[in-house]
Image (spheres, helix red, strand yellow):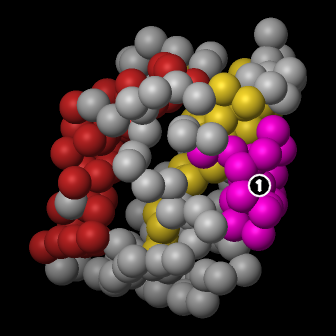
Amino acid sequence: MPRLALYTFGVLKSPLADPAPLTNEFYDRGAAIYRKISRHPGYLAHAEAADGVRGLLFGADWGAWGEFVVPTWYDKGRTVETTALAATLSLWTDLRSAVDAVYTGLHREALNRRYDWFERSAHPNYVFWWVADGVIPTWQDGVSRLEHLHDHGSAPHAFTFHHSFTPEGTPTRSKDIGPKSDQVR
């Protein structure tokens, strides 16, 4: 049975290593959100670095999730001291489970505060795609799909909540789920 991959990406206003209160708040909330989401029905797994050092994304050991890469539009630092981004890569059983996890509880509260932590962007900040059972998506897969979504809009290859597709590639539109705007041209 196919599984749903979700890649998210955002550019932070300050590096993860910054000791400023807002940066610490974002990082601390992220840890609590992941604990909560990992128990959500439909959640299967997410990419975690073996080392788990705050701010160490580039060069970390991500195992089967592959080498950490970012979209071409990211133009900030790549060292522990300068990395100013947040990215996630996760697997879900279905779209409804992912939507429920993202748009409820602690994650919903964080989304309401996203502009306290993240720069505004004309680029999409998430993308979905289907993977075959047993396939672990890579960071490169996520970046490629996000860039495809930005350049071409939703398609079976890369899609959003509002313009989603079944595993067979048939358009499906779930009313009243996801954000009011997918930020895609």
Report the side of 7 relative to 24 (left or right): right
Report the side of 115 relative to 15 (left or right): left
Q: Is 168 part of what is drawn in magenta? A: no
Report the side of 116 relative to 101 (left or right): left
Q: As displayed, is residue 2 above or below residue 30?
A: above
Residue in the foreground of this view, choosing between 50 and 31: 31
Residue 154 at what x, y percent from top left?
Answer: 71, 50
Report the side of 101 relative to 45 (left or right): left
Q: Is 142 part of what is drawn in magenta? A: yes
**Residue range of the region highlighted in magenta in the rendering:** 140-160
Residue placed farthest to the left in the image?
21
Quadrant of the image occupied by residue 108: top left
Local crowd size for mark 1, using a 10 Å CA cut-off: few (<14), some (14–19), many (≥20): many
Residue in the foreground of this view, choosing between 27 and 95: 95
The residue at 55%/87% (across/down) is: 77
Can residue 57 be seen by looking at this rendering? no
The residue at 72%/58% (across/down) is: 153
Main SS category, magenta section: helix
The residue at 43%/39% (across/down) is: 178
Which amino acid, by three-letter code, is at mark 1? Answer: Arg
Residue 103 at what x, y percent from top left?
Answer: 33, 35
**Count of labels in the image:** 1
Residue 107 at what x, y percent from top left?
Answer: 29, 41
Quadrant of the image occupied by residue 57: bottom right
Residue in the foreground of this view, choosing between 150 and 51: 150
Which quadrant, please, contains the C terminus?
bottom right
Q: As displayed, is residue 86 above or below residue 182?
A: below
Residue that label 1 marks: 145
* SS state under label 1: helix
